[in-house]
Amino acid sequence: MPNSCPSFALRFLAPGCICLAVTLAPGALAQQPHAAAVHPAKAAAGQSVPALMVSDIHFDPFHDPAKVPALVAAPVSKWASILAAPDSADQPQAFARLQESCHARGVDTPFVLLRSSLAAMKSRQPDAKFITVSGDLIAHAFTCRFATLVPSAAPGDYQAFVVKTLSFVMDELRSAFPGAPVYAALGNNDTGCGDYKLDANSEFLAQAGAVFAEGLPAAGRAQAAAEFKATGSYSVTMAAPMRRTRLIVINDLFLSVKYTTCGGKPDRDALAGELDWLRQQLAAARKAGEKVWVMGHIPPGIIPTPRWPSSATCAEASRR
Ligand SMILES: [Zn+2]
C-alpha cells in the first residue's frame, strides 16, 4: 500500500504502517445470486460487516538488543513475557548502535507499540468479524539485525527466528480478536533468506504456511497450508458473515523486479506457476458464482516518475 492514509484511517505502528477500521458497505457483501434475483433490494439492504485491514506492521523483536538471546532460545509462547519485561539499562544506546550498523531509517514497531496499537484497534472496532494483514509483518533490515546480534547463528537459525516472529505477530492479532479469522499475506520482508528473496517449494514456505493457516476458517485450513507451501499464496472461502466470497491471497513477490531466489537467481517457473494458479482460482470462483477479493503485498502498477526505474512496481516506490 502507498504511504498515504484516507481520512477515515487509523494510522499508527511503524512509519508506513496502515490500519483501517472499516465497516463494509452492503455492496461489499457478497450477495447470494438466488436471493438477489428474488429480492434484490432486500439482499442489499441494511447489512454491514465490521472488519480491520492492516498492513506493514513491521514488528521489531530487536528493539531491546539485550533480549534477543532469550528470544532466540525461547519458544514463541514465551516471547510476550520476555518482551513485556523492563528494557535493559542500555537499550537506547544498544538500539542506536544497531540502527547505525544496519543503516536503518526510522524506528519499526516494538512490543509496546504493537500492544498499544492492538488496544486502539479493539477500541475502534471491537466487533471486527475478520482482519486482513497485507504483508510485512516483520521489521526492515531483519537479516542485518539478526546477523549483528546473533553472530554465532547456525544455518537455519535465521529462518527459525523469522518464522517465530511471524508466529508471534499472528498470535498477538488472534488473541486480541479471538474468533475472528486473520487473513495474512507475505510481504517482501517476510522471508527466510532476506528482503525480496524467496525459494518456491521451500521449507520456509511450509513453516510460514502452517503459521498463517492456523487462524483461517477450519474448512479451508489444510488446503490453504498445502497451497502456501508451493509459492506462499492461498485461496480461502471467507467465513460468515461474508457470503460466497473467496479471498485469494497472492504472494506477488515473484512479480517484483527486485525478486530473486535465496541464491540470487531469477525464477521464471515460480512466476509462471503463480499466475497459472491465480487463473485457476479465478475460473473456479466464476464457476461457483463467488465474489472474489484478491490481496497481495505489492500493488500492481508502474511508477511514472524518473526517480524509479520504469519497470519498478508502484509499491516499490512507497516501500523500503
Ligand atoms: Zn513494508
Image (spheres, helix red, strand yellow):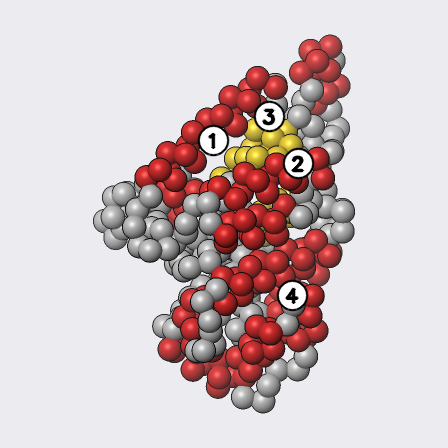
Label 2: few (<14), some (14–19) or many (≥20) C-alpha neighbours in 10 Å = some
Which is closer to the viewer, label 2 or label 3?
A: 2
- Which mark is on residue 19? none
Circle 3 residue: 291
Type of residue at label 2?
Answer: Gly
Q: Alpha carbon of mark 3 to alpha carbon of mark 1: how far?
A: 15 Å
Circle 2 residue: 220
Circle 1 residue: 278
Front one among 122 and 141: 141
Circle 4 residue: 76
Dot 4 and dot 2 residues touching (CB under 8 Å): no
Dot 2 and dot 3 residues touching (CB under 8 Å): no
Vertical position of residue 268 compared to residue 95: above or below: above
Q: For the point 60% across and 74% down, which residue is it?
A: 73
Q: Alpha carbon of mark 2 to alpha carbon of mark 1: how far?
A: 17 Å
Q: For the point 50% across and 54% down, which residue is it?
A: 204
Dot 4 and dot 3 residues touching (CB under 8 Å): no
Res. 80 visible in picture: no
> Is residue 180 found left or right of 93 in the rendered image?
right
Q: Secondary structure at mark 2?
A: helix
Q: Alpha carbon of mark 4 to alpha carbon of mark 2: how far?
A: 25 Å
Res. 287 visible in picture: yes
Q: For the point 43% across and 42% down, which residue is it?
A: 252
Which is closer to the viewer, label 4 or label 1?
A: 4
Type of residue at label 1?
Answer: Leu
Q: Secondary structure at mark 4?
A: helix
The C terminus appears in which quarter of the rendering?
bottom left
Type of residue at label 3?
Answer: Lys
Q: Secondary structure at mark 3?
A: strand
Residue 114, position in %: x, y? 62, 64
